Each structure stands twice: as structure tokens, then as C-alpha cells.
Amino acid sequence: MENSTLSQLADNYNMIRTLRLDKDKEAAKLKEQENALKDELIARMKAEGYTAVGASTCLIRYHKKDEPTVTEWEKVWGYIQATGEFELLQKRLTPTAVMERWDANIEIPGIGHFPVESISVSQIKPLK
């Protein structure tokens, strides 16, 4: 690749990127099918009273657990402020919200920045 021209390198990049995007679409369709089958398995196992099903290639076990969900953010924020239990929150920023403030010349203490390099691709149809 080091001996290729910049144009050839761009074409190779575009070809591999397009192939990956096609595979991503294929994987997304498979994930849809997987989720539909999973939903059907769960529904049928619950309806028929099974917690496990053995097949020729696998053993499927049904599990149920409670996941937390916020019903009233104001109460959660009040609790966290009162107790200092910030570990209840994920430690990440919303980049869009920070950039909106930067665009308005508002600096937020404790937030830095680093450059991220990228490229954009526009497809060119070959002439026939």
C-alpha cells in the first residue's frame, strides 16, 4: 500500500468502507431475526412454563431480572445532591451539549478537548 498513489489509497479505502457498510446492513438484518426469535422463545417458554429448553445444538435458559429506570429525574438528582452518591450516574458527557456551550463561548470548568481527525467520503459514479 505504501507504493500506491493517494488516489489508489482513497479508492481502496472507499472499497473496504463500502464492503464494511454492506456487511453492517447484513448484520443488522441478522440481529433483527435474532431478536424476533429471542422474543418468540421467551413468549413461548413463559406461556408453556419452561425455564430451560434443550435442543440438539444448545441449551436455552430463561432469566428475568429487574433493571433500574428513572421515573422522576428531579427526585433522583435531589437524592444524589443530598447524599453525594454520584456513582449512580455514568461518567460521560453529552458531546452535543458541551459543543453547543462552546459555540456560545461558554467554558465549562473541568472539561478539556482534544483534536479528532477524520475524513468524509462522497461517492462518485463512474461515467458510462
Image (spheres, grey):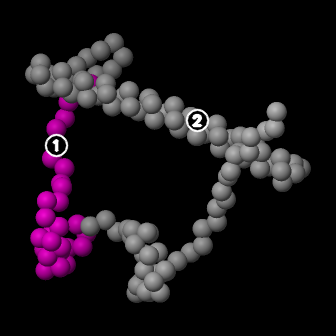
Horizontal arrangement in the rendering, residue 92 relative to residue 74 (left or right): right
95 or 92: nearer the eye? 95
Quarter assignment of residue 32 = top left
Residue 65: numbered disc = 1
* Residue at x-position 64% and y-position 37%: 19
66 or 17: nearer the eye? 17
Eyeballing the image, is 50 above or below 74? above
Residue 7 is situated, as x and y percent measured from the top left of the image, at 83, 50
Quarter assignment of residue 60 = top left
Quarter assignment of residue 124 = top right
In the image, the segment drawn in magenta is 60-88
In this view, the mark in front (1 or 2): 2
Eyeballing the image, is 110 above or below 127? below
Residue type at the position of mark 2: Asp
* Residue at x-position 17% and y-position 23%: 45
Horizontal arrangement in the rendering, residue 115 relative to residue 35 (left or right): right
Q: Which secondary structure, mark 1?
A: loop
Is residue 39 visible to us here? yes
User: In this figure, which residue is indicated by the disc labeled 2?
Assistant: 22
Residue type at the position of mark 1: Lys
Residue 80 is situated, as x and y percent measured from the top left of the image, at 17, 74
Horizontal arrangement in the rendering, residue 22 relative to residue 37 (left or right): right
* Residue at x-position 80% and y-position 49%: 9
Determine the CA span between mark 1 and mark 2. Answer: 35 Å
Judge whether residue 50 is colored magenta.
no
* Residue at x-position 43% and y-position 86%: 106
